[in-house]
Image (cartoon, rainbow, N blue to C red):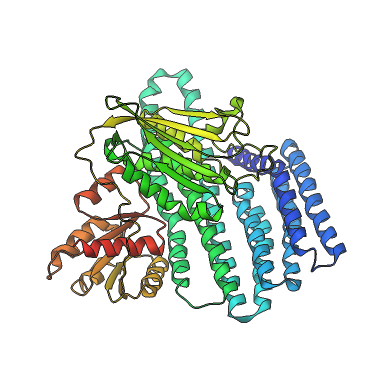
């Protein structure tokens, strides 16, 4: 056991050392941006001294960690303690930029805060395997930043400080979850190695190995479901609370900060969705459910969701799709593939560029439908066409001067996996300087009897003013966020932490929003059935279910009970629209 623990610690140190070698240019570029922001307001020697300290400490730490990872003669406990000390050094150097806020105006304070918080969030992926090192580095970024806002005083300073510290807490929870996943993965790998060794000596162990593999797969599936729920809970609360803040009168500077926080939440949500999608696709728990899909409706819904992102980057969106054209595919998987391709195209198109999505067939007898997503970005060299579909691959910007796009490098890897699951070929046509065109070939379906697609009517006006909504949620943090968000929409809100509390109030509300997984082993589906059964008034009680689970069985159960299903984290607009639609159709 001590040897196994030492090996685990060696691997933890090795991961941190490997991560320390990377990100050189990203840190340099970000430090240059910070220096540019504060240059006019902070004495030049201070700025240059800070810049030199950040770069030097980063390089010294990377070299020291590489040496420590290779030096197994030195006790691992001492090397881990040294890792914490190095993280204290770079955290102090990077975090000292917060002191510049004393000389900046509130707008530049907000920009500098965003950069420091981003540095701290990045430590989840670089230092979380050595948790004290993560806390040492991130704490020296988040805490001084929050302290400077507290010193600024006023409700704005206190509010931003609270948000920064809350975000620190969320990142700490993510880091602990990453560490747990790392340790479990290490343990599973060690078990598999021991099993392989034993199988070399005893063929009779094959049956036992098969049973263990089945259990490990089930455990992995349960872990993924639990991780999805637990990680999305704080994001759910933050998304709803940020939505409620939009309804509060505040100064332009404060509203700008709310938008920054909302944008950061959206990036976290996209990253979490991508990571969980990859895990579930690789685990084989996602099953394609082909059906007839009217592609023009699906395309309209997807493109509408990217209107704001395209406008922010000044990129035009253009679609061309014959009305009534239908394909046979899984609508959810196709929607997510198309969304990843459009998101990728917008990110890599320059200001003034165009993203074109076209759907066509060769003739009426053609059994296939071709869907293309064309951008006007820097293009991809032919030798890199296969590489861009690998995970965590982000090609460097071309010589055209286009800035590298923000992202996590998982989008096209998810497209590849989903395409393989659907049996749909994905082709890439691109060369440097000529943009990129991604082409999907889908099987055509008859243009009649098409089932509805989610997203229709997404742009319709709605209101919940004066409505009574019952919230059934066992998590007090998320329940409070629901109350804030629905109250800001003009609702009268009732709340319940248990099914019994909800049953006692069931005759009052116009609609109910409940979690799929409630405390005490109560299923949201059972709760929905009992609430509808006890409701004395007619028509049937409108209920909207919120879940972090994408298991096809959950989706099918919601369909059977006619329950609109929203995936966590849900923002206030999506929640309000779903409740209004459920009330209207009840």
**Quadrant occupied by the C terminus:** bottom left
Number of dots carrying numbers? 0
Residue 149, picture quadrant = bottom right
Residue 106, picture quadrant = bottom right
- Residue situated in front as seen by the camera: 330 or 227: 330
* Picture residue at 55% right of the left edge, 48% below the top: 179
Name of the residue lying farthest toward the right:
45
- Residue situated in front as seen by the camera: 258 or 372: 372
Report if residue 289 is visible in the image.
Answer: yes
- Residue situated in front as seen by the camera: 36 or 86: 36
- Residue situated in front as seen by the camera: 128 or 576: 576
The answer to whether residue 381 is left or right of residue 526 is right
Q: Position of residue 343 (x, y in %)?
A: 49, 45
* Picture residue at 47% right of the left edge, 18% below the top: 201
Up/down of 76 relative to 578, above or below: above
Q: Position of residue 198 (x, y in %)?
A: 47, 24
The answer to whether residue 233 is left or right of residue 530 is right
Up/down of 104 relative to 443, above or below: below
Q: Position of residue 22 (x, y in %)?
A: 69, 41
Q: Position of residue 420 (x, y in %)?
A: 40, 29
Report if residue 551 is visible in the image.
Answer: no
* Picture residue at 53% right of the left edge, 57% below the top: 173
* Picture residue at 46% right of the left edge, 37% below the top: 373
**Quadrant occupied by the N terminus:** top right
């Amino acid at each position: 056991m001590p040897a196994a623990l030492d090996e685990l610690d060696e691997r933890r140190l090795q991961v941190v050392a490997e991560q320390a070698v990377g990100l050189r240019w990203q840190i340099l570029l970000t430090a240059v941006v910070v220096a540019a922001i504060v240059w006019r307001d902070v004495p030049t020697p201070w700025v240059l001294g800070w810049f030199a300290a950040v770069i030097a400490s980063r390089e010294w730490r990377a070299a020291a960690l590489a040496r420590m990872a290779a030096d197994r003669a030195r006790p691992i406990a001492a090397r881990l303690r040294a890792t914490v000390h190095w993280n204290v050094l770079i955290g102090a150097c990077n975090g000292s930029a917060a002191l510049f806020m004393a000389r900046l105006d509130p707008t530049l304070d907000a920009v500098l805060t965003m950069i420091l918080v981003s540095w701290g969030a990045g430590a989840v992926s670089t230092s979380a395997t050595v948790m004290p090192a993560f806390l040492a580095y991130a704490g020296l970024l988040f805490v001084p930043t929050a302290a400077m806002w507290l010193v600024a005083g006023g409700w704005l300073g206190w509010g931003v400080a609270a948000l920064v510290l809350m975000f620190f807490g969320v990142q700490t929870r993510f880091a602990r979850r990453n560490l747990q996943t790392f340790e479990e993965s290490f343990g599973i790998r060690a078990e598999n190695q021991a099993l392989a060794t034993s199988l070399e000596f005893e063929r009779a162990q094959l049956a036992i190995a098969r049973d263990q593999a089945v259990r490990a797969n089930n455990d992995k599936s349960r872990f993924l479901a639990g991780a999805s729920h637990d990680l999305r809970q704080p994001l759910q609360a933050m998304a709803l609370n940020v939505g409620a803040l939009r309804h509060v009168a505040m100064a332009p500077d404060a509203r700008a900060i709310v938008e920054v926080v909302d944008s950061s939440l959206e990036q976290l949500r996209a990253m979490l969705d991508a990571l969980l999608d990859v895990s579930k696709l690789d685990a084989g728990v996602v099953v394609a459910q082909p059906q007839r899909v009217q592609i023009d409706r699906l395309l309209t819904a997807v493109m509408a969701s990217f209107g704001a992102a395209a406008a922010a980057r000044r990129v035009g969106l253009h679609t061309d799709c014959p009305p009534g054209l239908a394909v046979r595919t899984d609508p959810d998987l196709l929607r997510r593939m198309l969304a990843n391709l459009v998101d990728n195209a917008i990110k890599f198109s320059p200001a003034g560029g165009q993203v074109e999505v076209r759907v066509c067939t060769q003739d009426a007898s053609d059994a296939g439908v071709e869907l293309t997503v064309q951008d006007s970005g820097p293009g991809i060299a032919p030798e890199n066409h296969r590489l861009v579909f690998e995970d965590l691959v982000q090609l460097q910007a071309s010589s055209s001067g286009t800035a590298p796009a923000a992202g996590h490098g998982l989008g096209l890897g998810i497209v590849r996996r989903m395409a393989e699951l659907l049996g749909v070929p994905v082709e890439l046509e691109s060369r440097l300087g000529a943009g990129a065109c991604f082409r999907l070939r889908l099987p055509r379906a008859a243009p009649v009897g098409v089932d509805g697609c989610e997203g229709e009517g997404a742009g319709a006006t709605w209101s919940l003013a004066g409505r009574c909504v019952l919230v059934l949620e066992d998590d007090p943090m998320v329940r409070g966020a629901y109350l804030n968000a629905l109250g800001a929409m003009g609702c009268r809100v009732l709340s319940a932490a248990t099914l019994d509390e909800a049953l006692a109030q069931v005759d009052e509300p116009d609609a109910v929003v409940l979690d799929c997984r409630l405390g005490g082993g109560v299923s949201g589906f059972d709760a929905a059935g009992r609430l509808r059964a006890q409701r004395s008034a007619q028509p049937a009680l409108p209920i909207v279910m919120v879940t972090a689970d994408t298991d096809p069985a959950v989706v099918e159960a919601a369909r059977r009970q006619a329950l609109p299903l929203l995936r966590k984290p849900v923002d206030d607009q999506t929640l309000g629209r779903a409740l209004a639609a459920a009330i209207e159709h009840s």
